[in-house]
Every structure is written in structure tokens, then in C-alpha cells.
Image: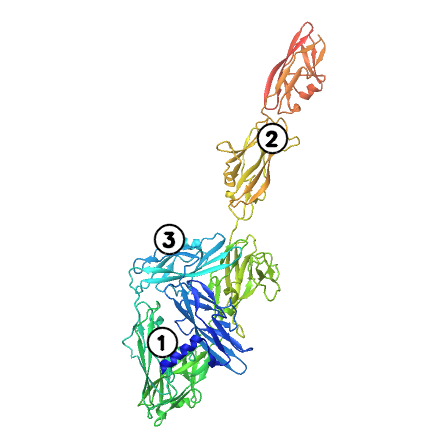
């Protein structure tokens, strides 16, 4: 009969019709197919179609009371409306290659003004092992010996799709909580910037990340879970794949399946109306590789109607299908006998299997349940309604409300003693802790239970009930109603790294939180400050002097259009100071760097939940690191004159004192100068055909057309003056150039000026014609008789010195006779101030000794004089 009922139930599920729930029906429930490591959206028509009355409040909740559900993937969100749309609900496979099936336990609840209906159901998942699109190669890494370190995770074992237009990143899942890997830990994961488990793909393969084996009793394989993402730099479209790297542990043996403990009874003895605990001496299993608490008991043959039920006291109203061994150790698993009374012993059987973390199953385990008939002389539990209270509260345990004991012959002698449980509270009488009390105390009442205010959903007390002759063991369940009194806690806060001036997604692996008391997706983040504000920037968090801003970005136009701006990439954007975790999960939160030359940001924020009086976390900070992008051209170093003074025919080194450019985005020494117009004259009479010098490599005296700031710093570059006599005046020249950094950013049309100073490096030359004079008369010494040439000295600066006076006459300047070593200059000759007076009759020839001097050079000569 039981088998027939089960078959009928299965047929009902296959037809996907739940007519027994009246106004609430699931008319379509199909297994969903997901590719290895990929995600798929739940189709509201083809996968899960729910019919409910108009106006009803209908929601679907993901139940997590079965440890075998969602073992290789997860469904988000945890709660969604029955009339969800395509794209609202997503199942993601985590990349395990050893499980082809998964399931998600759901509960549909519909509320109207007059009734509430619940439908529990399982959503089955089938995994398709198709080739991955992003992960092109994924080979195992190897640990040679127990406790050893593996080979490196590098390009020999792992490769990703190469697309230059997309940003590739890898995240190690569960790195911060230490759950996975199971038998070891990763080394070389911690980065300098933060304890982040997210890497650029190339960086990840170069980081020499290895696996260190820790648990020597492990099986010969472990797994490293990761996720890789490709983000298109233009459209910001994201592709994601989850995958696992297999770790081969060569000296370890293959995984062994769990074994039922031979030291336990596998038998539950329970009196009618008694809530019996399933304790570790009744049901237990062991496994070499899996920690005892992580072993899962899967019920393969459940109790039938009328046989009672196994329950988990954390959620006693949900059918129990599987549970952890740690739930037994924490007294959460119990048997509730059927309500009907019988005069004979009844025996029921539950079949289970123990499952380890790798999915290996034990042989079938039989749990025998014996429901004893009521013994009229023994004490009995006539009421065991349990106790319900909220976190941190205390409530009385009374005969009227919770726990009633009866004994026909000696009730006043009945004693209750705590023999187990009470993990999250204590019993008290008049404020004093107790573990034993009389049944009569329940009538007064004086017994109270005090919860310790921990975040727990249940506590249980195992009592031994005794009247001195007969003993009964039973479980008293305590249900703890969660109080939303705990602020959200950070799960990930690894920070963000992006390029200067860029906009980058803030995903769940960079920033996310959890809240034990409320729905994680509804956690709110509120920005307190961006600390790089200037004091006088005003109250707004969005000022021009900010390093960056947080914004929400959406492809579809928002329902409310206020403050949303359509960007060039087709996304609508709005700057925000408050956002929800749902925004992060749905990839709507971005950080935009505003392009200023500041390369770190720190965003202070708090988190709060949706409680009536929201619980607010302490202030946290989110670190942003901005990578310099070389997008600025070089600029002239402040105070640099771009000018030198050079002597004619000289060579002058160009130092950083006169030629220095700088670049905020790159080292100055890497800047390169390009001569775009060679040195040329730029004075009032420029001769553009004349070269005004050359730029040389100092050591080799070689002409160059390009050089670096480093060469300038070490005085390897020189200016050579032109091979040109400048005469007596200063001339001006310049050369034009551009400066570029390694990224190609260039500042053009730069001018370097050169002041060319003449040098007195030419000796004066005198052209002398004999002076003729009439005897005893005068003759003027003019330019036609004495002409001096000096290309680099002014005439007034050229002087003549008398080195030998005439013997037969005198040399006059104006009317003054010139003596030995007297001087005159070129203008004196030009202005006819110099004359020769012949004074000796009969002498026909004379001579005058002179030295011409330009201040540097001297030339001696004789002026011949003829008299007639």
C-alpha cells in the first residue's frame, strides 16, 4: 500500500499538477539544464510556471534544510516572486566535473486575506558536460607526497581565451572563509595590495600559486574552485565561467566510502507521546577523509503516514530528507511518534545512507524505531508542546502551556533531570541555574528557560523523567525566533584596482556582506565619505575634486528618470551614495575614476539591514587603487629657462638647469627629445641659409637629432656654436623640438634659445701706405694712409700706441705732440685728428713706430714718411 501511494505521488509530480492546494498550483516544473561552469536563467513558462489568484502575495523561497541540495551550484535570489520574469532567477553551476545532477528545494507560499497555502517542491538540475568557452585548458596539479606542496598553477596547466578587447580576471572562491580546498590550503595567494583573491588572468598564472597538502588522511584528490570573467571594454558585457582545478595527491589513497558505526544501537525506543532525540549513541558513521560533523545522512526510505516523523528542531515543520551528523551531535534530530495511541509495541524502519564530501555512499543503514505502549505505572509526558521565544528572551516552562507530566501513583516523587542539550541557554529557578527539578514545579510555575542571545534557531533539552521506579528519556524542543539585532558583516572587501580615468564594475567578490538575521540581497550600503574631499568642498559627496564616484549603471531606461544620464556606451548612469547588495549581485554598481592625477581612494561606508530599527555596522573602508595610465604629455619643468649663452666657435653642455621636461605619468629620464628644426639664427637680420650650430653627443662629437632626458642629466648632450665669425655683435639663434614619453604622448613646437656671444679671437690687421709730406710742413694721417681691420672689435676699442717717435718730425693729436707710449684710436684717424709735422730741413725720410691693440692681440708696424 505504501509503495502504491509513493507511485501515485511520483506520477502527480511528473504531471506537475498540484490540484490539492486549490487556488495555488504549479502547472509546470521541468528539470533545468545547465552547461558545465555556466549559468542559466529560470524560465517562468518552461521551467517553473506558478498559478495563483490575482491579488495574492505569492513568493518562492529557497530552502536550505537539505545538505544534499545545491551541492554543485546555487540559485539566486533566495526569495523571488511567483510571477518572476525571465532574467530574474539564475542557477549557476560551480564547475564540478564529478556530479551530473543537483536539486534545489523550494517552497511556494501564497497569502490572501482568508488563507495561506504552501507547496514544497524540488527543482532538479541536469549538468551538461560541454566544452568551456573561456577556460581553454584545465589540467590537474600534482602533490607528490603527503603533506607536500603541489606544482604551480601556471600556463602549463591552465589557459584562458585570449581576447585583447576584453579584461580577464580570476577569483579564488571561498578563499577568505577557508572552507575549500578541503584537505589543504593555497600558498602565494596574498597580494601586496590586500588580502584579495582576485587576479588579472595573466597575473594569476604568473603568481606561482600552489596547493599545500595538510590533512594526511585525505583522499587522493582535492579541488580548487575558481571563477573567470571576461568583460568587454567597450560594451561592458560580461562572460563568466566557474571551474575547478583538480589536485592529485599521489601518495594518498582513493576516497573510501563512509561506514556505519558498529558501536551504536541503530534503535530508538520511545514512549507514546514522547519526543525522542536521535543521539550519537543511536546513529553515527565514520569516514577516513571526511570530518565526522560533515558526514551527511540521506534518508532513502522515509517513514510513511501514521508512523510518525523525523524532524530537525531548527525547522520542525519541514519534511526531513537529509541532515548532517553534526545535527545529531547538537541534539537537533528527533523522532515524533504518531498521534494515535496503541496498546501494543509498534516498530517502524527508516533506511538511510551516509554520504561523504566527495559523494561516496555507505551501505544501507537501518534505523529501527520502537514505539512502546503506555505503562500505566510509569510517569508519562502528556503534553510536550515545546517552548518558543525570541533570541535573548526568557520564558516559563509550565504545565498549562508547554510541558505536562502525569503519574497515577506517585506524582509528587517524579523528578526531571537534564541529561543533554541546553547548548544555548539554561534553566533557572528564582534566578538560580538548575539541572534538576520536580514535576510539581511545573504547576507553580517556577521553571524558566533563559536564552543566551546567540544567533541560533533552536535549543533542545533531553530530560530523564523518573518516579524512582521507571525512567523515560525524552526531548523537549525549544524554538528560537530570530531577532534582527545583528548588523551585516563583510564577506568580501578585497578592494578594486582600475586604470586611471576608467570605470570599473564592483562585483560580489570585491564587496559583499552577509546578515545572519535577514536576507543578504537586501543589505544596504551607505557611503559616509570619500576622504579625499577638500574641506571647503561643501556637503555634497560629488565634487570636482573627488578622486572618483560610485554609480549605478543600467542598460534599460530606469522607471524613474531623475538624475540618470545616458552615457556614450549606451548605459544609463546615476551617481549614488547608497546602494543595496542586490545592486552588486546584479552587476549594477560601478566606480568611476574622475581622471585627476590621484591614484588611491578610500571609501568609508556603513551597512544596515531592513529591520524596523536598522542594525548599522561599524564604519568600514573600501580601498581603490588607480593604475597610472600614461595619457599626459611631458611638460616643462617649472623655472627651466630653455636658454643658454654660448661663445662663438664654442661647445656648451646642455644640463637639466637649462633643459628639463617632466611627466607625471612616467619617469623623466625616459623622455625623448626630437629636433624638428635645427639651430638657426633668429636676430634682426637672420640669415636662414646659415646654420647656427649643432646638437652633439658630447663623447663622440657626433651630431644627433634625438636624445633623452637621462642623457641631458648626465651631460652627454652639447651645443656646438657655428663655424662662423660673429664679428662684434651678439647674435641670437634657436632650435625647435618636441618631447615624447614612452607611450607616445608628445608636446610639440618647443623652442630652445641660444645667445651667441662674439669672442675676440682675431688679431687686428693694419694696411699702411707711406705718408708723404712737404718739407717743414704738415700732413694728415688719415684712413687712406693707415687702415685697421679687426672683425671682432669695435673701432673705438682698437688703440694705437707710439713705440718709436719720428726723428725728423713730430706726431700731433689735435695740437698736442705725442710722446713715447702715448695712444690714440681709430676714430682719431677717421676724424683727421692725427697729423705729422716735418721739422728738420734736408731730411727726406722719417718713420713712426706703432703698435695696434684690440685689447687681446697686438700688432707692431712702421709707418714710413717721405718729405720732398
Measured as percent of width and height from the top left, residue 626 is found at 51, 54
Q: Residue at x 28, y 63 (%)?
A: 253
Please tell me which residue lies in front, 39 or 256: 39
Q: Name the residue under label 3.
A: 156
Gap between marks 3 and 1 measured at Cα? 44 Å
Percent x, y for residue 863?
Answer: 64, 13
- The colour scheme used to paint the residues is rainbow
Per the model, the C-alpha gap separating discs 1 and 2 is 103 Å
Secondary element under disc 2, as helix, strand or loop, is strand
Which comes before the other along the chain, label 3 or label 2?
Answer: 3
Q: Can the viewer see residue 50?
A: yes
Comes first in the chain, label 3 or label 1: 3
Left or right: 663 with respect to 320?
right
Residue reaching furthest to the top: 842
Up-down relation of residue 221 to residue 445 (above or below) = above
Mark 3 or mark 2, whichever is nearer to me: 3
Count the numbered circles shown: 3
Numbered tag placed on residue 299 in the rendering: 1
- Name the image quarter holding residue 530: bottom right
Q: In the rendered structure, find residue 783 and report the number of the disc placed on it.
A: none
Q: Is residue 668 shown above or below 501? A: above
Camera-side residue of 54 and 408: 54
Amino acid at each position: 500500500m505504501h509503495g502504491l501511494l509513493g507511485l501515485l505521488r511520483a506520477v502527480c509530480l511528473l504531471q506537475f499538477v498540484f490540484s490539492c492546494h486549490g487556488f495555488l498550483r504549479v502547472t509546470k516544473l521541468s528539470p533545468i539544464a545547465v552547461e558545465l561552469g555556466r549559468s542559466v536563467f529560470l524560465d517562468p513558462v518552461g521551467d517553473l510556471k506558478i498559478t495563483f489568484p490575482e491579488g495574492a502575495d505569492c513568493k518562492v523561497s529557497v530552502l536550505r534544510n537539505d545538505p544534499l541540495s545545491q551541492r554543485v551550484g546555487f540559485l539566486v535570489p533566495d526569495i523571488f516572486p511567483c510571477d518572476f520574469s525571465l532574467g530574474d532567477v539564475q542557477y549557476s553551476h560551480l564547475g564540478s566535473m564529478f556530479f551530473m545532477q543537483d536539486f534545489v528545494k523550494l517552497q511556494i507560499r501564497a497569502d490572501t486575506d482568508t488563507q495561506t497555502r504552501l507547496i514544497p517542491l524540488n527543482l532538479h538540475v541536469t549538468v551538461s558536460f560541454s566544452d568551456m568557452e573561456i577556460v581553454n585548458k584545465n589540467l590537474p596539479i600534482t602533490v607528490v607526497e603527503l603533506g607536500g606542496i603541489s606544482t604551480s598553477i601556471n600556463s602549463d596547466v591552465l589557459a584562458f581565451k585570449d581576447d585583447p578587447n576584453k579584461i580577464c580576471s580570476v577569483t579564488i572562491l571561498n578563499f577568505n572563509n577557508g572552507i575549500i580546498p578541503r584537505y589543504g590550503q593555497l600558498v602565494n595567494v596574498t597580494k601586496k595590495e590586500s588580502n584579495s583573491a582576485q587576479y588579472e588572468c595573466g597575473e594569476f598564472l604568473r603568481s606561482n600559486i600552489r596547493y599545500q597538502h595538510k590533512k594526511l588522511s585525505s583522499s587522493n584528490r582535492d579541488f580548487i574552485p575558481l571563477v573567470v570573467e571576461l568583460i568587454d571594454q567597450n560594451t561592458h558585457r560580461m562572460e563568466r565561467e566557474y571551474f575547478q582545478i583538480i589536485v592529485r595527491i599521489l601518495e594518498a589513497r582513493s576516497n573510501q566510502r563512509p561506514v556505519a558505526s558498529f558501536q551504536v544501537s541503530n534503535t530508538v525506543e520511545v514512549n507514546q507521546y514522547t519526543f525522542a532525540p536521535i543521539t550519537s549513541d543511536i546513529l553515527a558513521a565514520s569516514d577516513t577523509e571526511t570530518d565526522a560533523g560533515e558526514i551527511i545522512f540521506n534518508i532513502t526510505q522515509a517513514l510513511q503516514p501514521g508512523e510518525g516523523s523525523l524532524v530537525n528542531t531548527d525547522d520542525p515543520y519541514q519534511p526531513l530528507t537529509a541532515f548532517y551528523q553534526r545535527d545529531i551531535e547538537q541534539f537537533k534530530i528527533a523522532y515524533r511518534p504518531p498521534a494515535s495511541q496503541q496498546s501494543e509495541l509498534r516498530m517502524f524502519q527508516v533506511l538511510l545512507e551516509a554520504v561523504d564530501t566527495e559523494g561516496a555512499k555507505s551501505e544501507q543503514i537501518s534505523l529501527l524505531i520502537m514505539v512502546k505502549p503506555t505503562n500505566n505505572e510509569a510517569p508519562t509526558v502528556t503534553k510536550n508542546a515545546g517552548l518558543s521565544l525570541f533570541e535573548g528572551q526568557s520564558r516559563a516552562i509550565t504545565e498549562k502551556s508547554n510541558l505536562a507530566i502525569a503519574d497515577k501513583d506517585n506524582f509528587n516523587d517524579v523528578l526531571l533531570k537534564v541529561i543533554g542539550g541546553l547548548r544555548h541557554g539554561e534553566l533557572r529557578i528564582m534566578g538560580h541555574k538548575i539541572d534538576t527539578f520536580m514535576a510539581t514545579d511545573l504547576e507553580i510555575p517556577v521553571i524558566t528557560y533563559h536564552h543566551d542571545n546567540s544567533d541560533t534557531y533552536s535549543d533542545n533539552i533531553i530530560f530523564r523523567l523518573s518516579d524512582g521506579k521507571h525512567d523515560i528519556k525524552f526531548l523537549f524542543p525549544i524554538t528560537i525566533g530570530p531577532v534582527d539585532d545583528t548588523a551585516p558583516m563583510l564577506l568580501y572587501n578585497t578592494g578594486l584596482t582600475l586604470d586611471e580615468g576608467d570605470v570599473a564594475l564592483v562585483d560580489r567578490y570585491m564587496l559583499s556582506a552577509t546578515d545572519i538575521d535577514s536576507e543578504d540581497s537586501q543589505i544596504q550600503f551607505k557611503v559616509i565619505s570619500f576622504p579625499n574631499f577638500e574641506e571647503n568642498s561643501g556637503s555634497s559627496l560629488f565634487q570636482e575634486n573627488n578622486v572618483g564616484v560610485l554609480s549605478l549603471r543600467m542598460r534599460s531606461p530606469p522607471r524613474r528618470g531623475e538624475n540618470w544620464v545616458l552615457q556614450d556606451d549606451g548605459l544609463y548612469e546615476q551617481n549614488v551614495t547608497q546602494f543595496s547588495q542586490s545592486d552588486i549581485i546584479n552587476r549594477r554598481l560601478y566606480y568611476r575614476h574622475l581622471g585627476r592625477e590621484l591614484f588611491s581612494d578610500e571609501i568609508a561606508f556603513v551597512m544596515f539591514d531592513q529591520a524596523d530599527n536598522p542594525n548599522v555596522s561599524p564604519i568600514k573602508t573600501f580601498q581603490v587603487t588607480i593604475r597610472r595610465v600614461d595619457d599626459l604629455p611631458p611638460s616643462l619643468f617649472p623655472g627651466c629657462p630653455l636658454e643658454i649663452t654660448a661663445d662663438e666657435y664654442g661647445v656648451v653642455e646642455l644640463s637639466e638647469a637649462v633643459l628639463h621636461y617632466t611627466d607625471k605619468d612616467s619617469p623623466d629620464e625616459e623622455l625623448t627629445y626630437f629636433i624638428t628644426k635645427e639651430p638657426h639664427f633668429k636676430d634682426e637680420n637672420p640669415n636662414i641659409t646659415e646654420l647656427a650650430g649643432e646638437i652633439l653627443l658630447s663623447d663622440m662629437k657626433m651630431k644627433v637629432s634625438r636624445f633623452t632626458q637621462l642623457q641631458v642629466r648626465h651631460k652627454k648632450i652639447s651645443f656646438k656654436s657655428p663655424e662662423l665669425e660673429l664679428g662684434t655683435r651678439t647674435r641670437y639663434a634657436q632650435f625647435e623640438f618636441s618631447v615624447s614619453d614612452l607611450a607616445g604622448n608628445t608636446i610639440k613646437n618647443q623652442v630652445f634659445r641660444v645667445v651667441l656671444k662674439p669672442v675676440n679671437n682675431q688679431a687686428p690687421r693694419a694696411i699702411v701706405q707711406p705718408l708723404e709730406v712737404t718739407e717743414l710742413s704738415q700732413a694728415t694721417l688719415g684712413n687712406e694712409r693707415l687702415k685697421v681691420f679687426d672683425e671682432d672689435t669695435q673701432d673705438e676699442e682698437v688703440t694705437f700706441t707710439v713705440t718709436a717717435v719720428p726723428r725728423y718730425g713730430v706726431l700731433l693729436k689735435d695740437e698736442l705732440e705725442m710722446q713715447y707710449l702715448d695712444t690714440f684710436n681709430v676714430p682719431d684717424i677717421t676724424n683727421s685728428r692725427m697729423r705729422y709735422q716735418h721739422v728738420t730741413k734736408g731730411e727726406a725720410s722719417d718713420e713712426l713706430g706703432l703698435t695696434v691693440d684690440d685689447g687681446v692681440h697686438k700688432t707692431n708696424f712702421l709707418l714710413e714718411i717721405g718729405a720732398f
